């Protein structure tokens, strides 16, 4: 087991407001983390910080033992892949070209993608059920199709750690289930781990081994899902009563309406 | 890959064709075969001198200026992730134009015009970039708006300079403002700059590909985006400054050419940049050839023609895009 990402006393601030206070977090291989919390609590900002895309206001981050901010952007992108919350269709790029973007950190400045890279891209498109989209232009795709293409690009990056911001956005139930399956086989394992922002507690329970809950005052809780999935804790975190039905390994969470 | 090669070959064909047209037509028409002969041999005849001393230098200058504007447009559009961005919209050309007119008003010699343009363009760049950078989050719509406002400021300043300028200087200034290649006979500097820029940018081409997907996404894919942004802005400003110093304020090439090349499948910057350089050069060369032959012996400022050609094409593209 390797620690892929470690945060020590990590604080995140935006415009003077402290979103996360002194976070200690260790993401080890084989783990899958759900990042939970209310709207606007700072989930995306924390995810960007963990990915090294924005500076932390205090604390340290280590990526596979090395200080994250000591890595070059290229080296960082070979260790951590990020799926952003908002999709982006670019300038009429086609789908295969977009997915090949995942090979970018692996290639030298003047190198062209070879048959090897194209094969990886096609395999990733197949994994997300997007093979038939390969020749389409990005700006002609539906929201859900674009999401699957972006996840294919993330897989194509072949990093040990994947950080995903609401990966299930725009996906229908069938594609949601298929995609969670793919993420679990491709991004969680003896050399891989993932962290994803999700809003559906049932998805968070079934797809993830660990939870990180952010509260509105900068407090946080991190640990195995079974320790955190209590009605009391979830009620506090979301400011709304949430029922946990059933116990053991297969509980269901229901928002009281 | 095959599509890329075809696109590059088509652009090379367009370049050859427009160069050939530019050296053959004019106040005297010289047959193409004879013209090609004059390019490679020197017989001192009138036709030979027309080609070697007048038409070829002007054609190469027009080509270089068009190429510079098109490549600058590509860079600005990636920087702002907005296909409507170009050096004019961002106030870069306005800065260069304002500085050059100021230099003309002060009756500085022609040698000062290029440095003035560079200083004006970089100053405008720093102004726009600095004001946008002051805020914590760096947003492209803010940059675009700041650029538009700064451009309006330059336009006002230019109007001021024009209104206080002596009468006899006005025609020259106005022609220059409209974009004029009538005095453009020194292709060396702009052409060298264009070739250098295209070669250097090939090192950044794949970075630009991912940057077209958004700067945050590019950062996630391993691009040092802070550096790339600076490079894009300053290279874009330098290319624009050179183009403006040589050809005046020629619009629409930087906007239309990258757009057209992307439409026909050149979204990969490894192809887009050289093809935009070649076809931007060809477009301006064709426009300039038309400008000096349409109502000969009078010459039109080439900027009038690029706008006349550019506006309907751009509107058509926008319509088609909206219809999709």
Image (tube, rainbow, N blue to C red):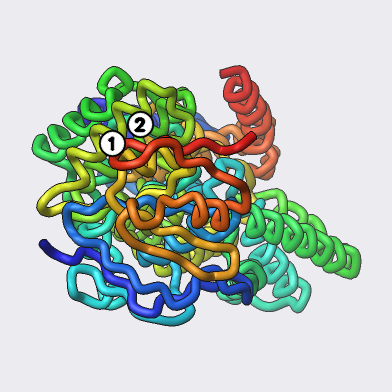
At which x and y percent is residue B289? 54, 36
The image shows residue A208, relative to residue A177, as above or below, that is below
Which chain does the residue under circle 1 lie in?
A
Q: Is residue B24 visible?
A: no
How many marks the image carries: the answer is 2
The residue located at (62%, 76%) in the rendering is A16
Q: Residue furthest front?
A: A247
Badge 1 density bin: few <14, some 14–19, many ≥20, Cα 10 Å: many
Q: Is residue B126 visible?
A: yes
The residue located at (64%, 22%) in the rendering is B319
Q: Which mark is residue A148?
A: 2
At which x and y percent is residue A87? 47, 40
Instruction: State which quarter of the image contains the N terminus of chain B.
Output: top left
Badge 2 density bin: few <14, some 14–19, many ≥20, Cα 10 Å: many
Quarter of the image where one finds residue B270: top left
Quarter of the image where one finds residue A177: top left
List the residue tagged with mark 1: A152
SS for callout 1 = helix
Q: Give whichever of B177, B255 is nearer the camera.
A: B255
At which x and y percent is residue B206? 30, 50
Which chain does the residue under circle 2 lie in?
A
At which x and y percent is residue B233? 50, 63
Quarter of the image where one finds residue B200: bottom left
Q: Which mark is residue A141?
A: none
* Distance CA(mark 2)–CA(mark 1): 6 Å
The residue located at (59%, 46%) in the rendering is A241
Q: Give whichever of A40, A97 is nearer the camera.
A: A40
| Tag 2 near tag 1, CB within 8 Å | yes
């Amino acid at each position: 087991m390797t620690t892929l990402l470690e945060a020590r006393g990590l604080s995140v601030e935006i415009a003077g407001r402290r979103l996360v206070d002194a976070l200690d977090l260790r993401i080890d291989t084989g783990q899958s983390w759900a990042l939970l919390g209310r709207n606007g609590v700072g989930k995306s900002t924390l995810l960007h910080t963990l990915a090294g895309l924005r500076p932390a206001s205090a604390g340290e981050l280590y990526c596979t033992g090395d200080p994250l901010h000591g890595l070059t952007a290229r080296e960082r992108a070979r260790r951590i892949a990020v799926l952003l919350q908002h999709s982006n269709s670019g300038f009429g790029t086609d789908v295969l070209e977009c997915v090949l973007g995942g090979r970018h950190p692996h290639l030298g400045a003047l190198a062209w993608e070879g048959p090897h890279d194209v094969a990886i891209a096609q395999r990733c498109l197949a994994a997300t059920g997007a093979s038939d989209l390969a020749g389409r232009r990005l700006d002609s795709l539906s929201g859900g199709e674009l999401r699957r293409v972006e996840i294919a690009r993330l897989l194509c990056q072949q990093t040990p750690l994947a950080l995903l911001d609401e990966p299930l956005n725009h996906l229908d139930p069938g594609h949601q289930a298929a995609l969670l399956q793919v993420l679990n086989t491709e991004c969680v394992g003896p050399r891989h781990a993932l962290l994803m922002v999700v809003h559906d507690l049932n998805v968070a329970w079934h797809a993830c081994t660990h939870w990180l809950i952010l509260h509105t005052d900068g407090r946080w809780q991190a640990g195995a899902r079974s320790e955190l999935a209590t009605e009391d804790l979830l009620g506090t975190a979301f400011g709304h009563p949430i029922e946990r039905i059933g116990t053991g390994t297969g509980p269901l969470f229901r928002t009281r309406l | 890959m095959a599509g890329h090669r075809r696109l590059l070959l088509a652009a090379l064909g367009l370049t050859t064709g427009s160069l050939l047209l530019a050296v053959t037509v004019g106040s005297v028409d010289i047959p193409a075969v004879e013209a090609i002969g004059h390019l490679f041999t020197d017989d001192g005849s009138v036709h030979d001198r027309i080609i070697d001393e007048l038409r070829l230098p002007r054609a190469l200058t027009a080509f270089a200026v068009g190429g510079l504007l098109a490549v600058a447009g590509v860079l600005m559009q990636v920087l702002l992730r907005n296909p409507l961005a170009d050096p004019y919209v961002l106030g870069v050309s306005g800065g260069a134009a304002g500085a050059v007119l100021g230099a003309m008003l002060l009756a500085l010699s022609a040698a000062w015009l290029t440095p003035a343009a560079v200083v004006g363009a970089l100053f405008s760049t720093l102004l726009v970039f600095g004001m946008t950078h002051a805020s914590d989050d760096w947003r492209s719509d803010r940059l675009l708006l700041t650029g538009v406002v700064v451009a309006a400021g330059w336009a006002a300043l230019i109007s001021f300079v024009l209104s206080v300028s002596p009468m006899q200087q006005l025609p020259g200034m106005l022609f220059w403002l409209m974009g004029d290649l009538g005095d453009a006979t020194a292709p060396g500097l702009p052409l060298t700059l264009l070739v250098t820029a295209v070669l250097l940018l090939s090192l950044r081409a794949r970075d630009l590909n991912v940057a077209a997907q958004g700067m945050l996404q590019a950062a996630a894919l391993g691009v040092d985006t802070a550096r790339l942004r600076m490079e894009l802005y300053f290279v874009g400003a330098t290319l624009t400054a050179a183009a403006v110093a040589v050809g005046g304020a020629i619009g629409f090439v930087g906007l239309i050419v990258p757009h057209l090349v992307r439409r026909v499948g050149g979204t990969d910057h490894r192809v887009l940049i050289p093809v935009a350089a070649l076809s931007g050069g060809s477009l301006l060369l064709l426009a300039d050839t038309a400008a000096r032959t349409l109502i000969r012996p009078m010459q039109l400022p080439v900027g009038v023609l690029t706008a006349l050609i550019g506006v309907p094409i751009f509107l058509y593209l926008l319509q088609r895009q909206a219809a999709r």
